[in-house]
Image: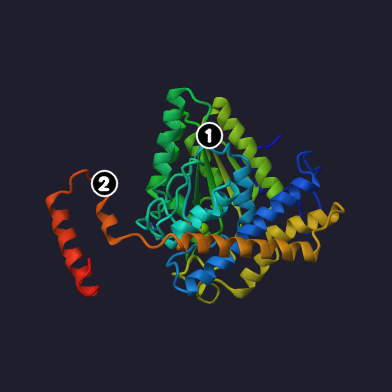
């Protein structure tokens, strides 16, 4: 039985890959290999996107390296296309693990014609209709009250869907966060709140963020259970998130899960100097030693089913080929026309926008030597 409010994070597999308790039967070597492949794919996606940034082909990216077990693990507890997800900006690994096509994700990052928002949203802020994955917003915790509202609607409509919303540790200091949890608690709405606690909010350490002993304890104030899990242990994340999601789905009201993890790379490309400016190299090294992908590899070795070097190299090469091909396909659809900024909102453009359209057309014509 998985208990809330444990003083230590719930863990199934030690850092050296040795199970600390019997593995649930679902974790066959085949299943563990699938999870490993999903995590490695996400890690390599990060690497490729950083290259695309450096080439100037996209302009914003927030990597999730180090946090793969949290996001891939959470994805397994979601009934994709049935439940609703209100994510935050670091959740592309969650999206990929939920089956969001890489083509869709890359089209959004590159702002090509194949992007469903046609370049009108900040890069890396995608949405995915088939997965009920709501458009990512950058305003910290702004997704939390609408997620609570979505869950209230699900309750009133009598569905068995749940709402899942994710956020960082820093988000828990925002008023929106408290409003969302309070409302979901008061309404007993089926909302699963998941904190991806990577211990830093850009340069603000968790210790400066709150005087609470941890984040999950805040659930008590809002009348819901708070679970604490080692976010770098994929088995533990799946077990705890699935338990919490099923508890929410059964009509018991909301729940909070705190996944303790670490962002090993920079916050985003707006913070390229992470290690040197606000955290020590030693701290980063320590967490690199707790890598979630290495842990599942060690577990597979312990179980007698190691991922050998050639297999690992092929998984990496496959992701690189996949990204290259999807970038090529997305870029082949071209850049959206400038006129689209005036489309899809008003049936008839109001006068001030008509004026702006005229100005933009004139500027465009000027830059294009007389062609609009
Ligand atoms: C309302 C608001 N305030 C400030 C910012 C600037 N900002 C962007 S990310 C961030 C840190 C958030 O940290 P956390 O919630 O822990 O998520 P993490 O980036 O660590 O995954 C801040 C302060 C913002 N985007 N929105
Ligand atoms: Mg954080």
Which residue in the structure is indicated by mark 2? 345
Which residue in the structure is indicated by mark 1? 82
Give 202 or 8, whichever is nearer the viewer: 202
Q: What's the mark number on residue 237?
A: none
The residue under the point 49% across, 58% down is: 106
Element marked by disc 2: loop
Tell me the distance, in whole angstroms, between the alpha carbons under discs 1 and 2: 28 Å
Q: In this view, does 140 lie to the left or right of 36?
A: left
Q: Indicate the quadrant where residue 152 lies.
A: top left
The residue under the point 62% across, 64% down is: 321
The residue under the point 24% across, 53% down is: 342
Q: In this view, does 319 lie to the left or right of 53?
A: right
**Place of residue 137 in the rendered image (x, y in percent of width and height, measured from the top left):** 40, 52
**Place of residue 275 in the rendered image (x, y in percent of width and height, measured from the top left):** 55, 73
Q: Can residue 10 be seen in this view?
A: no
Counting other residues with Cα less than 10 Å from the Cα at mark 2, is it few (<14), some (14-19), or many (20 or more)? Answer: few
**Place of residue 125 in the rendered image (x, y in percent of width and height, measured from the top left):** 43, 55
Closer to the eye: label 1 or 2: 2
The residue under the point 56% across, 45% down is: 216
Q: Where on the image, by quarter, is ligand 1? A: bottom left
Q: Is residue 43 left or right of residue 351?
A: right
Q: Is residue 49 visible?
A: yes
């Amino acid at each position: 039985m998985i208990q809330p409010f444990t003083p230590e994070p719930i863990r199934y597999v030690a850092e050296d890959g040795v199970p600390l308790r019997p593995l649930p039967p679902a974790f066959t070597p085949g299943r563990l290999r699938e999870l490993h492949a999903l995590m490695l794919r996400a890690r390599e996606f990060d690497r490729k996107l950083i290259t695309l940034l450096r080439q100037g082909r996209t302009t914003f990216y927030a990597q999730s390296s180090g946090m793969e077990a949290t996001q891939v693990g959470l994805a397994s507890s979601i009934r994709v296309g049935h439940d609703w997800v209100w994510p935050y900006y670091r959740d592309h690994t969650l999206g990929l693990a939920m089956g969001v096509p890489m083509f869709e994700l890359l089209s959004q990052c590159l702002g090509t014609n194949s992007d469903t928002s046609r370049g009108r949203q900040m890069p890396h802020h995608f949405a995915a209709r088939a997965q009920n994955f709501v458009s990512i917003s950058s305003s910290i915790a702004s997704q939390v009250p609408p997620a609570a509202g979505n869950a209230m609607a699900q309750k009133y409509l009598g569905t068995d869907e749940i709402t899942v919303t994710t956020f960082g540790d820093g988000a828990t200091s925002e008023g929106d966060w408290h409003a969302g949890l309070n409302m979901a608690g008061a309404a007993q709405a089926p909302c699963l709140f998941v904190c991806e606690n990577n211990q830093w909010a850009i340069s603000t350490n968790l210790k400066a963020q709150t005087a609470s002993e941890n984040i999950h304890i805040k659930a008590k104030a809002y009348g819901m259970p708070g679970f604490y899990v080692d976010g770098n242990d994929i088995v533990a994340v799946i077990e705890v998130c699935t338990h919490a999601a099923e508890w929410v789905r059964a009509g018991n009201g909301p729940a909070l899960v705190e996944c303790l993890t670490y962002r090993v790379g920079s916050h985003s490309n707006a913070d390229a100097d992470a290690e040197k400016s606000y955290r020590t190299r030693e701290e980063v090294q320590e967490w690199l030693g707790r890598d979630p992908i290495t842990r599942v590899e060690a577990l597979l070795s312990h179980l007698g089913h190691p991922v050998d070097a050639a297999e690992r190299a092929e998984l990496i090469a496959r992701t690189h080929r996949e990204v290259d091909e999807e970038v090529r396909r997305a870029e082949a659809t071209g850049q959206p026309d400038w006129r689209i900024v005036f489309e899809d909102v008003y049936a008839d453009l109001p006068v001030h926008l008509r004026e702006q359209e005229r100005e933009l057309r004139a500027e465009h014509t000027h830059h294009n030597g007389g062609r609009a």
